[in-house]
C-alpha cells in the first residue's frame, strides 16, 4: 500500500509540475527574447540620435560603440549600406523600417531591430542593430535550468511528504492485519488500536465488535457443550443403569423396569427440548422458565 500511495502522489506531483513548468518555460523564453529586443531597440534609437539626418547630405557617420556584441549598420533611403556591419543590400527588416516604422525580426541566428531616421516627415535612412541569438538563448537555458532545479526540489518534497503520509496510512492497517492474524491463531483478547484517521478507526471499531461477538459466541458454545454433556449424560446413565439392573436380577419385574425406562426416556426427551431451546435463545436474553408447581418438581426429583 505504501508503494501505491507514493506512486499516486508522485504521478500527481509530476502532472502538476508539468502543467506549471511548461507555461513558465515558454514565458521565460518569451520574456528574455522580448527584453533583448527592447534593449536592441533602445540602442538603435540612441544610434539614430547620434547619427542624425545630416548623414544623407554626405556628413560622416558616427556610430556608438558596441554593447555586449551589438552590431550597428546605417542605410540610406535606397537601402544601401553607408556604414557599420550589416548585409548588403538591405534585408527585409531594413526595407520594412524604410516604410517609417520600427521593425524587429530574427534571421540567420541573429536578433535584428531596424529604426528609421526621419527628417521632417521623410525617412532618410535606417539604423540597424543586431546581436547574436545565442547569447539570449544562453540566458534562456540558464532560466530553464533554474526552473528544472525548482521542479526537482518540489518533486523531492512531494516524494518525502507522500512517504510520510503513506506510512501514516499504512501503519494502522498493518497493525490491524497483525491483530487479525493473532485472532486467527486463537488470541481472542487481541483488539485493534485506534488511529488518527477516521475511516480506519471505523474499520477498527467494526473489527473489534466482530471479535467481541465471536468471543461471546465461542464462550456460549463452550458453556453449551459442557451443560449439554452433563444434562444428557445424567438421564442416559440412569436409563442404562435401570435396564442393566433389571437384566441382572432374574426376579425383577420387567414391566416396572420398562415403565421406569420409559419415564427416563421421557425425561431425556424433555432435557433435549430444553437444551435445544437454550441453543436458539439469544445469550443476551435469559431463557424463560417453564411454570411448574414446586410439589411436582420435588416429586420428580424424588423419583429420579
Image (cartoon, rainbow, N blue to C red):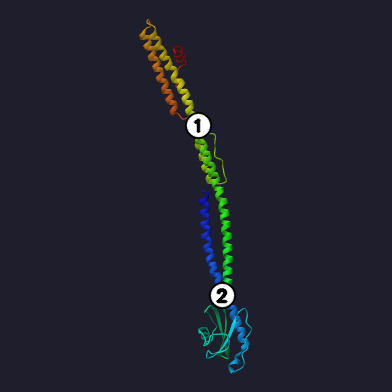
Q: Which residue, given by chain and number where applicable, does mark 1 sit on?
A: 216
Nearest to the observer: residue 243 or residue 2: 2
Classed neighbour count for the residue bearing mark 1: other residues with Cα under 10 Å, few (<14), some (14–19), many (≥20): some
Q: Quadrant of residue 141?
A: bottom right
In the rendered structure, find residue 239 and report the number of the disc placed on it. Answer: none
Mark 1 or mark 2: which is in front?
2
Q: CA distance from mark 1 to mark 2?
A: 82 Å
* Residue 219 to residue 270: above or below: below
Could you tell me which quadrant the C terminus lies in? top left
Mark 1 vs mark 2: which is more N-terminal? 2
Locate residue 267 relative to residue 162 in the image: left or right: left
Classed neighbour count for the residue bearing mark 2: other residues with Cα under 10 Å, few (<14), some (14–19), many (≥20): few
Residue 99 horizontal/vertical position (percent): 52, 87
Residue 27 visible, this orientation: yes
Residue 9 horizontal/vertical position (percent): 53, 55
Secondary structure type for disc 2: helix
Residue 140 horizontal/vertical position (percent): 57, 71
At x 58%, y 68%, the residue is: 143
Q: Which residue, given by chain and number where applicable, does mark 2 sit on?
A: 134
Q: Most extreme residue toward the top, as rendered? A: 251
Amino acid at each position: 500500500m505504501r508503494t501505491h500511495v507514493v506512486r499516486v502522489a508522485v504521478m500527481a506531483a509530476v502532472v502538476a509540475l508539468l502543467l506549471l513548468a511548461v507555461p513558465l518555460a515558454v514565458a521565460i523564453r518569451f520574456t528574455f527574447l522580448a527584453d533583448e529586443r527592447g534593449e536592441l531597440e533602445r540602442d538603435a534609437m540612441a544610434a539614430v540620435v547620434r547619427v542624425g539626418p545630416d548623414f544623407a547630405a554626405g556628413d560622416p557617420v558616427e556610430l556608438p560603440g558596441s554593447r555586449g556584441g551589438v552590431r550597428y549598420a546605417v542605410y540610406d533611403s535606397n537601402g544601401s549600406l553607408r556604414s557599420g556591419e550589416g548585409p548588403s543590400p538591405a534585408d527585409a527588416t531594413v526595407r520594412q523600417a524604410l516604410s517609417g516604422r520600427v521593425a524587429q525580426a530574427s534571421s540567420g541566428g541573429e536578433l535584428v531591430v531596424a529604426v528609421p531616421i526621419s527628417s521632417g516627415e521623410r525617412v532618410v535612412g535606417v539604423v540597424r542593430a543586431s546581436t547574436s541569438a545565442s547569447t539570449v538563448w544562453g540566458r534562456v537555458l540558464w532560466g530553464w535550468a533554474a526552473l528544472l532545479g525548482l521542479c526537482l526540489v518540489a518533486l523531492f518534497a512531494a516524494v518525502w511528504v507522500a512517504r510520510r503520509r503513506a506510512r501514516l496510512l499504512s501503519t494502522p492497517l498493518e497493525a490491524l492485519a497483525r491483530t487479525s492474524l493473532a485472532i486467527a491463531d486463537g488470541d481472542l483478547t487481541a483488539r485493534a488500536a485506534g488511529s488518527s484517521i477516521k475511516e480506519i478507526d471505523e474499520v477498527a471499531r467494526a473489527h473489534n465488535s466482530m471479535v467481541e461477538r465471536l468471543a461471546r459466541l465461542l464462550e456460549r458454545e463452550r458453556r453449551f457443550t459442557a451443560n449439554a454433556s452433563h444434562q444428557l449424560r445424567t438421564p442416559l446413565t440412569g436409563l442404562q443403569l435401570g435396564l442393566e439392573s433389571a437384566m441382572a436380577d432374574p426376579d425383577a419385574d420387567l414391566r416396572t423396569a420398562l415403565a421406569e425406562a420409559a419415564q427416563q426416556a421421557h425425561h431425556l426427551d424433555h432435557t433435549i427440548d430444553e437444551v435445544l431451546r437454550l441453543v436458539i435463545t439469544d445469550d443476551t436474553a435469559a431463557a424463560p422458565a417453564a411454570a411448574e408447581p414446586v410439589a411436582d418438581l420435588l416429586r420428580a426429583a424424588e423419583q429420579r
